[in-house]
Amino acid sequence: MQSFLIATAISLVIVGLAAAQSSTVANSLDDYIEQNQRQYDARIRQCEETLANFRTLFSKRQQLIDVQADLLQQKLEEASARINPLSLIDPWHRQCVQNYSSSIPTIATARSGVANCQAIISTILNNAESAYNTLKKYYNTNLKNSLADCVKKFPSAQLNYTLCVTNVIAAANAYSISSQNNFNTYVKDADCTADSRIRAAWICSSRQVYSTSAAVETAQRLIDNCIDNQLVCGSVSCSAGCPNVSTISLTEVDFRNETIRNPFRGLSAQAGCREFRFK
């Protein structure tokens, strides 16, 4: 009975020592693993910041297009404030405005045309984001599984466990460097693509601004010319009715002749105006 109790106690001690040794093996490289893990976490944060900064800069570089849209709206509002009151003066002015103001685009149409020039970031960062996601998944899955396998394979062999962990970390470091290089390359490529798209957007918006501004200026000039022609034709001075009226009877005219009787003969140059009426 005594020998049985001794054997049982020895077995428990051996199991306890084995468990303690396994725990000691697993914990012996905790600082080493954690130090490398902090570096991996910092690498992931750097990639995230790079992607976020890229998106922010891309958006800021397009703010000029928004400014152009605002300036274009201001120009259209000023044109409207100048032209619309003219149509209230008299039928002549109203007709002039109606004839040519239709070529001026609305504010909504003008802003939409400029907005359509906006560059789209959509697929520019696809490769860089894929490299980032793949690296993050490697750290969260492959690396953790490989370190857990070292504990399972060598629960009590300190040297073998150490070699296993250092090999896993070495492979992770090599993979990190390769992935980081790929990520940096993809970001540079995305930057070149962004430059091209932003440049095209600026050219497009500038053309929209120029064409709209030209339409406004042309319409204003034509309206002004139309109004000025009222003075040329004499409608301003005679629109209310000229007191000096001369009547020409069509029955007195011989349409086979190239000449007619001079209707101005005997009139005074001091009359100021002369209205001719045919009957």
Image (tube, helix red, strand yellow):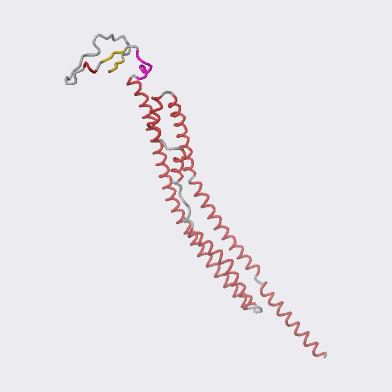
Q: Is residue 250 magenta?
A: no
* Closer-to-camera residue (128/217): 217
- Residue 254 vs residue 275: left or right? left
Looking at the image, the residue that sits furthest to the right is 2
Above or below, comparing residue 205 to residue 234 in the picture: below
Which stretch did the figure color magenta? Answer: 235-242
Residue 252: image x %, image y %? Answer: 21, 15
Where residue 133 sits, quadrant-wise, is bottom right
Residue 135: image x %, image y %? Answer: 54, 64
Going 65% across and 67% down the picture, which residue do you hit?
A: 31
Q: How many marks?
A: 0
* Closer-to-camera residue (96/12): 96
Q: Which image quadrant: the C terminus?
A: top left
- Residue 29 vs residue 262: left or right? right
Looking at the image, the residue that sits furthest to the front is 251
Q: Which image quadrant: the N terminus?
A: bottom right
Above or below, comparing residue 193 to residue 253 in the picture: below
Above or below, comparing residue 71 to residue 132 in the picture: above
Above or below, comparing residue 181 to residue 274 in the picture: below
* Closer-to-camera residue (190/85): 85
Going 25% across and 16% down the picture, which residue do you hit?
A: 249
Going 65% across and 69% down the picture, which residue do you hit?
A: 30
